[in-house]
Amino acid sequence: YTLVIYTSSVMRGQRSSIEIMTDLLEVAMEERRGRHQTDGGVPVSKRELMRSANLNYNQLTNYLDTLETKGFIIRNETNQGLFLEITDKGTEFFEQATSVTTLLNDE
């Protein structure tokens, strides 16, 4: 896959879609560290994801769809809540995107 980051959005102070996706993955990764689950996922509230990533419901849904389509997460919505599992590919994306974003934002 290819990372495309529009530096103009970074320079204006707006978050890029890459930054938003890393924010969502970071929340899910923090949840995973805090709660040990053996059933293939971590329960994460949509409200928590929306608040942490500063998104509305439609934006959240679109970003979660993208993350799932790209193979970065496995998402399972049940009556018990939303379960997210970060894949190896998602972890690799998170690490690379975070590095690139850090380099772009350094002054």
Image (cartoon, grey):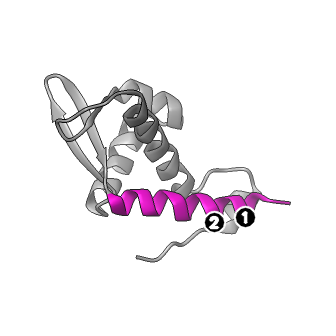
As drawn, 10 above or below 56? below
Residue 5 rendering spot, x and y as whole percentages:
59, 68
Q: Name the amino acid type tagged 1.
A: Leu
Magenta segment's dominant SS is: helix
Find the residue positioned furthest to the left: 79
What's the residue at 40%, 76% (across, down)?
1
Q: Quadrant of the C terminus?
A: bottom right
Within 10 Å of disc 1 (Cα), the crowding (few <14, some 14-19, many 20+) is few
What's the residue at 31%, 30% (across, down)?
36
**Which range is magenta?**
88-107
Locate residue 105 relative to residue 40 in the image: left or right.
right
Residue 82 rendering spot, x and y as whole percentages:
25, 32
Query: What is the quadrant of residue 61 in the picture?
Result: top left
Residue 80 rendering spot, x and y as whole percentages:
17, 22
Q: Name the amino acid type tagged 2.
A: Val
Residue where numbered disc 2 is placed: 100
As drawn, 76 above or below 50? below
Residue 100 rendering spot, x and y as whole percentages:
63, 66
Locate residue 32 relative to residue 78 in the image: left or right.
right
Residue where numbered disc 1 is placed: 104
